Image: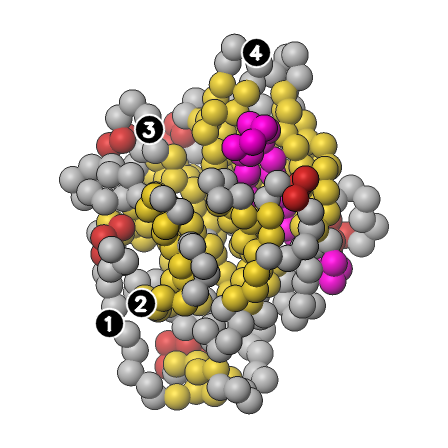
C-alpha cells in the first residue's frame, strides 16, 4: 500500500489522480468522478487551517443560528460564522493553542435553576478540553479540563477528537475524547461534565473504551444521543460503533465502511436525524473528496456524494429549517483552503 505523508504532495497528487482501493492495493485510475455539488455558501477564511464545524440552532430565531469552526494552529481559535458565512467577531474564541475538534449540546445543567447550551473543543498543545456557554461565549471550565492525565507518553496525551453526549436516561453530560496516538484498546476516554456551586465545570473520567487498528489514528467522533450510540473513524480501517451510555458496557456494536468504501483516510462524521429512528451517518472520504452515506438505522451503505470539497476533515449537519437558503437544514464541511462550505440539506439528495 502507498502512503504519502507530505500533505502538500498528497493534495497535488489527489487533484491529478483518483485513488481507487482494490482488494490488493490503492492505485491511481482514470475513473469518472461523481457530479460535483456546489455549496450554497462559502465562509470567510480563517487565518490558519480549518478542521471541524459544529452548528448551533438559535431556539428563538433559527435565521440567527451560528456555525462554529476550529482554526487549527498554535495561534488558533474557534471562529463563529453566520449563515451567510461571515465571521461574527464577538462570538469567536481566540488565542487557543491548536484547537482540533469541536462539538455542541443544548441544555447543560449549570446549577439548580440555570441551563445553558455549550460548546466543547480540544486544545491539543495544552492537553485539555475547553467548555464555553453558547451564545454568550463565557468560559465555564476555569481555564481548561486536563485529559489523559494517566498517560506517560506525551503523544497519547494530545487530544484531537471530541463529541458530547447528553444521556436521555439520566440527563448527564459527557465528553468523549480521542487523541493523537493511543493503544489498541481503550483509545477513547469518556468524562462526565459537572458544574460546582460556582458554575465551574470539571470532568471526571467514567470509562475508557474503543479498539484501535493501529494503522493511523482516531480523530472524528460523533454521538447519536437519541439512539445512544457513539461512532468514530479508525482512519485507515473503518467506522466503529459503541454504546454511548457507560452502563451499557464497552463491547463494540458494529463495524462498517471497511469493505473498500474509502480510498484512504476515513474522517469527519455527521449524524442526520430525520425522525423516527431514520436518518444518515455521513462520513468524509478525505482523499477521494467524497462523503459516504450510511443508514442511521442499520449502518448499511447508501451512496457516495461529491460535494466539491477538498481534503475534508470535519463536518456537521442539522435537519432543522433555518432560513430561505437552508430551507431543509444545513450540512457544513471543512474545505482545505481555510474555509467551510455550507449546503442546504436537500442538495445531498437523501430525501
**Residue where numbered disc 3 is placed:** 58
For the C terminus, give its image quadrant: bottom left
Q: Helix, strand or loop at disc 1?
A: loop
Residue 333, given in percent of the width and then of the height, sits at 37, 53
Residue 170, given in percent of the width and then of the height, sits at 58, 28
Marks 4/3 in contact by CB < 8 Å: the verdict is no
User: Against 208, is 175 above or below?
Assistant: above
Q: Is residue 36 left or right of residue 23?
A: left
Q: CA distance from mark 1 to mark 2?
A: 6 Å
Q: Earlier in the sequence, mark 1 or mark 3?
A: 1
Label 3 crowd bin: few (<14), some (14–19), many (20+), radius 10 Å: some
Mark drawn on residue 112:
4
Please report the residue visible at 69 percent of the width from the left and 60 percent of the height from the top: 211
Marks 1/2 in contact by CB < 8 Å: the verdict is yes
Q: Helix, strand or loop at disc 3?
A: loop
**Residue where numbered disc 2 is placed:** 306
Looking at the rendering, the stretch of residues picked out in magenta corresponds to 163-185
Can residue 196 be seen in the rendering of this structure? yes
Give the quadrant of residue 86: top left
Residue 146, given in percent of the width and then of the height, sits at 71, 36
Mark drawn on residue 227:
none
Q: CA distance from mark 4 to mark 3?
A: 23 Å
Please report the residue visible at 31 percent of the width from the left and 43 percent of the height from the top: 319
Q: Earlier in the sequence, mark 4 or mark 3?
A: 3
- Work out whether residue 15 or residue 308 is closer to the camera in this orientation and state it: 308
Amino acid at each position: 500500500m502507498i502512503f504519502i505523508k507530505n500533505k502538500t504532495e498528497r493534495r497535488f497528487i489527489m487533484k491529478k489522480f483518483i485513488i481507487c482501493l482494490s482488494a490488493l492495493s490503492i492505485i491511481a485510475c482514470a475513473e469518472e468522478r461523481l457530479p460535483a455539488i456546489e455549496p450554497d455558501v462559502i465562509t470567510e477564511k480563517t487565518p490558519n487551517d480549518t478542521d471541524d464545524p459544529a452548528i448551533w440552532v438559535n431556539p428563538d430565531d433559527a435565521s440567527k443560528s451560528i456555525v462554529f469552526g476550529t482554526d487549527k494552529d498554535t495561534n488558533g481559535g474557534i471562529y463563529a460564522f453566520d449563515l451567510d458565512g461571515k465571521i461574527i467577531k464577538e462570538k469567536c474564541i481566540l488565542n487557543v493553542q491548536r484547537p482540533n475538534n469541536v462539538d455542541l449540546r443544548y441544555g447543560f445543567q449549570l446549577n439548580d435553576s440555570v441551563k445553558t447550551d455549550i460548546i466543547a473543543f480540544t486544545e491539543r498543545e495544552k492537553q485539555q478540553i475547553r467548555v464555553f456557554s453558547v451564545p454568550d461565549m463565557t468560559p465555564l471550565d476555569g481555564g481548561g479540563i486536563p485529559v489523559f492525565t494517566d498517560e506517560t507518553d506525551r503523544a497519547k496525551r494530545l487530544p484531537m477528537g471530541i463529541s458530547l453526549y447528553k444521556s436521555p436516561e439520566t440527563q448527564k453530560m459527557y465528553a468523549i475524547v480521542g487523541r493523537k496516538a493511543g493503544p489498541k484498546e481503550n483509545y477513547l476516554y469518556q468524562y462526565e461534565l459537572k458544574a460546582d456551586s460556582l458554575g465551574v465545570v470539571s470532568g471526571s473520567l467514567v470509562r475508557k473504551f474503543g479498539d484501535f487498528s493501529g494503522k493511523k489514528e482516531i480523530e472524528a467522533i460523533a454521538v447519536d444521543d437519541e439512539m445512544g450510540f457513539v461512532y468514530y473513524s479508525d482512519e485507515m480501517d473503518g467506522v466503529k460503533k459503541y454504546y454511548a451510555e457507560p452502563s451499557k458496557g464497552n463491547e463494540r456494536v458494529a463495524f462498517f465502511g471497511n469493505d473498500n468504501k474509502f480510498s484512504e483516510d476515513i474522517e469527519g462524521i455527521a449524524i442526520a436525524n430525520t425522525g423516527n429512528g431514520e436518518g444518515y451517518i455521513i462520513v468524509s472520504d478525505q482523499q477521494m473528496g467524497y462523503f459516504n452515506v450510511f443508514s442511521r438505522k442499520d449502518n448499511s451503505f447508501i451512496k457516495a456524494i461529491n460535494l466539491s470539497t477538498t481534503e475534508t476533515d470535519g463536518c456537521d449537519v442539522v435537519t432543522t429549517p433555518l432560513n430561505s437558503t437552508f430551507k431543509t437544514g444545513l450540512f457544513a464541511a471543512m474545505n482545505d483552503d481555510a474555509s467551510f462550505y455550507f449546503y442546504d440539506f436537500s442538495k445531498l439528495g437523501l430525501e
